Image (cartoon, rainbow, N blue to C red):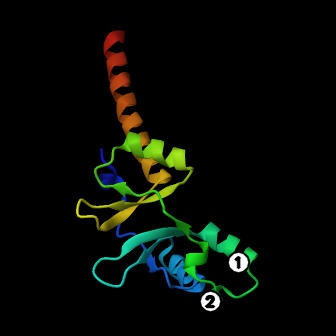
Amino acid sequence: MSIGQICTRGAVTVPIGASLEEAAAKMLELGVGAVIVTNGSFGEPAVAGILTDRDIVRARLGHSGALSAISVSVAMTRDPLVFDEDETLTNALRALRARDVRRAPVLGRDGRLIGLVSSDDLLAEIAAELGALAQVVERQGRGRER
């Protein structure tokens, strides 16, 4: 199974020039804990970073101004881990662990942003695969008992 098959499509994005207030409002409205920060004014925007709800809290505690006065660029994680859609589940797990992150943008074969994959997505896929394997083992065990 590839990352492109399990990622959440249509990831939520905000432009790099947005305020933290705008990003937080969008996150709240759409019920997400992270947004992909994009830059570029022509064509498809490029991934510039990732911003989590935790980043917003840290930025707020570190600045005395209102969230509307703090740019997303101040709080975001720059140079985020990014996966190609063909990346394997195993390699993605290794990369997430090596970078100590829980989420990563996913790019299509054409280099455009197609989604976001999280450790929760990977865990759900692994659990489903383990469940299928457990069913095989259980069926084989019943056959030997007869």
Residue 143 sits above or below residue 52 on the image: above
**Percent of width and height locating residue 92:** 41, 46
Residue 117 sits above or below residue 33 on the image: above
Q: Quadrant of residue 133?
A: top left
Residue 2 sits above or below residue 61 on the image: above
Note whether residue 33 is visible: no
Q: Residue at x 59, y 85 (%)?
A: 21
Could you tell me how far apart the alpha carbons at marks 1 and 2 are, in whole angstroms?
10 Å
Which of the image's four quarters has the C terminus? Answer: top left
Residue 48 sits above or below residue 15 on the image: above
| Amino acid type, mark 1 | Arg
**Percent of width and height locating residue 62:** 74, 75
Between 62 and 27, the residue placed more toward the observer is 62
**Percent of width and height locating residue 79:** 49, 63
Instruction: Give the number of the disc on residue 60.
Output: 1
Between 17 and 57, the residue placed more toward the observer is 17
Instruction: Give the number of the disc on residue 9.
Output: none
Note whether residue 116 is visible: yes
| Amino acid type, mark 2 | Ser
Q: Circle 2 is placed at which residue position?
A: 68
User: Are the residues at dot 1 and dot 2 in contact (C-beta closer than 8 Å)?
Assistant: no
Q: Residues within 10 Å of mark 2 (few under 14, many from 20)?
A: some
Which of the image's four quarters has the N terminus? Answer: top left
**Percent of width and height locating residue 68:** 62, 89
Q: Is residue 98 left or right of residue 133?
A: right
Tell me how many marks there are: 2
Q: Residue at x 69, y 70 (%)?
A: 58
SS at circle 1: helix
SS at circle 2: helix
Q: Residues within 10 Å of mark 1 (few under 14, many from 20)?
A: some
